[in-house]
Image (spheres, helix red, strand yellow):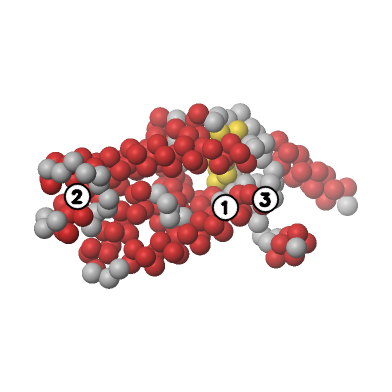
Amino acid sequence: MQLLWTKHTKWLDRNPVKVPVSKRLIAYAIDWAVGGIISGFPAVLFYGGITGRSDMFSDLYVFPSLGFPTYWSYLAGILCIVVAFIYYIYIPYKKYPGQTLGKRWLKIKIVNNDDYSDVSLKTLIIRQGIGLFLLEGSAIVVTNYLRQMLTLATGFYFDYYLKLIGMVITMISGVFVLSTASQRSIHDYLAKTRVVGEDEKPVKRKEKKNKKNKKKNNA
């Protein structure tokens, strides 16, 4: 089974990192919890302020179902997206290079795959915005709201189908992280990034390149 997996996944990056998989998973869990609470908070505030109800907020569909204009759903969703952008993209770009709060607490960071340099804003938008939010965010609050807004805007229940697709992509991404030494997820491949320790350098990769060059010169 292992040989079969290796044979059909030769294109996967297997250059090792020093970060234990457990750290990667714990950081993800922290960001899922903290990022979810922070990015979902505007919708909760809107729900209480607009409806005057004190029961638990469920989803953006609740506004039209209670007889309120749909634009409240869009406004609440857009504010949640802005807050998620700050948490998942702005903070790793400006405040803590390559680090969400979860990654900072676990002392790991997102870097460019080639030279382990700090990631740019464009790279973070591709990795977090497109890769994480749109493709793999089956359990992320802001992704749920994106699906709900699309459903409300079109009248077609995209929510269910997009969630299923997102779950499949997320599971495949998880397999990549757990089964390869590089621990690169789908959004890492998309943005050409990887997650490493704060002080980790690509020494081994450079050494391998130097050895290959020496062999070529000797030949």
Location of residue 124 in the rendering, given as x and y in whole percent from the top left corner: 44, 45
The mark that comes first in sequence, 2 or 1, is 2
Q: Does the image show residue 132?
A: yes
The amino acid type found where label 1 is placed reads Gly
- 204 to 126, vertically: above or below: above
Location of residue 81 in the rendering, given as x and y in whole percent from the top left corner: 30, 47
Which residue is under mark 1?
174
The amino acid type found where label 2 is placed reads Leu
Residue beneath the point at 62% across and 47% down: 183
- Label 2 neighbourhood size at 10 Å, few (<14), some (14-19), many (20+)? some
Numbered disc in front, either 1 or 3: 1
Q: Secondary structure at mark 2?
A: helix
Quadrant of the rendered image containing residue 150: bottom left
Marks 3 and 2: in contact by CB < 8 Å?
no
Residue beneath the point at 21% across and 44% down: 55
Location of residue 178 in the rendering, given as x and y in whole percent from the top left corner: 63, 49
Which residue is under mark 3?
180
Q: Does the image show residue 217?
A: no
- 105 to 134, vertically: above or below: above
In the rendering, which numbered label is found on residue 186?
A: none
